[in-house]
Structure formats: C-alpha cells, structure tokens
C-alpha cells in the first residue's frame, strides 16, 4: 500500500454516474458496477483522465457519466484488475482503497470514447461475464 504522502503530487479521478458535490465521500459497500454487482469492498480511483472516462461511461445507472476529482482519505494500492495480475505495471495508474474518497471538484469538459470503442469494451465485458470472470476483490 502507498501512503497518501507518497502520492500528494498526483491528481486523482473517479468516474461514475452518481451526482455528487465537493465534500461528499465515496465509500465502499455499494453494489459494484461490474460482474454480478456484488457489494464492493473497495472504491477505485485513477491518476489518468482516460481511465476515469471509462469508469464514467461503463458505470451502471441512470444519468450522465461524471468525473470527479477526488482525494484519498487513507492508503491506496494498485488495482489488481488493471495492474500486475492482468497487465505489466500500472499503465492506467489505477488504484483502490477501503477508505473513503473525498470529492474536491468535477471535470465537466471531457470527451467520451467513440461508439466503436464503447461497443468493443462492452463486448469484452460481456465475454468476461460469460466466462465467469469476476473482478478481483481480495
């Protein structure tokens, strides 16, 4: 796990469909946006806008995708769903934490992925679902 102090120079994002305001906390314990929608043991954040855009576009629920600027309130670790267990290193700079994320702002001027990219990602997620591959939550 990385200490917050080690990552102070990073700006972090969280993509979702939830309507949040600065000061709100994003906490674990809600249904996951992926797989069988199990109760999520972690909340996820990224240091890249592209990964946050994917989060906003793929999140389940009503309403527009949103990207929030967040700050972790505790330690964070590499997200094993997008890092060493599946890809070398951490190219998406994706992390997870069991501690809340505090919303400090919102990115409102972002461009989503092309319809072709979205279809390819949805097709891949459906393929993983059919294969019974779930998110790593341990």
Image: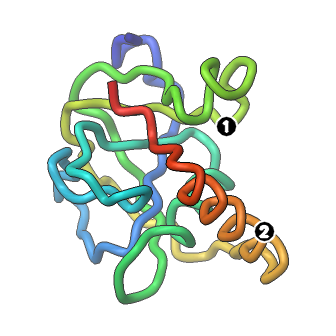
Quadrant into which the N terminus falls: top left
Q: Position of residue 37 (x, y in %)?
A: 31, 59
- Where is mark 1, residue-wise? 92
Q: Quadrant of residue 31?
A: bottom left
Q: Position of residue 123 (x, y in %)?
A: 71, 69
Q: Is residue 29 above or below residue 86?
A: below
Instruction: Say which of 132 and 82 sits in front.
Output: 132
- Where is mark 2, residue-wise? 120
Q: Is residue 62 above or below residue 92?
A: below
Quadrant into which the C terminus falls: top left
Q: Quadrant of residue 33?
A: bottom left
Q: Secondary structure at mark 2?
A: helix
Q: Is residue 102 left or right of residue 50?
A: left
Identify the residue at image location x=72%, y=30%. 91
Q: Is residue 30 above or below residue 84?
A: below
- Earlier residue among tags 2 and 1: 1
| Mark 2 vs 1: CB contact within 8 A | no
Look at discs 2 and 1 and give the one toward the viewer: 2
Q: Is residue 79 above or below residue 128?
A: above
Instruction: Say which of 54 and 123 sits in front.
Output: 123
Query: Circle 1: is it few (<14), some (14-19), or many (20+) Cα within 10 Å?
Result: some
């Amino acid at each position: 796990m990385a200490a917050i102090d080690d990552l102070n120079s990073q700006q972090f994002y969280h993509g979702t469909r939830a309507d949040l305001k600065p000061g709100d906390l994003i906490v674990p314990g809600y249904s996951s946006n992926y797989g069988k929608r199990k109760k999520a043991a972690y909340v996820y954040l990224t240091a890249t806008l592209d990964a946050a855009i994917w989060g906003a576009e793929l999140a389940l629920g009503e309403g527009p995708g949103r990207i929030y600027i967040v700050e972790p309130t505790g330690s964070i670790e590499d997200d094993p769903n997008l890092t060493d267990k599946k890809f070398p290193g951490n190219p998406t700079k994706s992390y997870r934490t069991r501690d809340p994320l505090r919303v400090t702002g919102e990115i409102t001027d972002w461009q989503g992925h092309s319809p072709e990219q979205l279809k390819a990602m949805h097709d891949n997620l459906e393929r993983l679902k059919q294969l019974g591959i779930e998110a790593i939550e341990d």
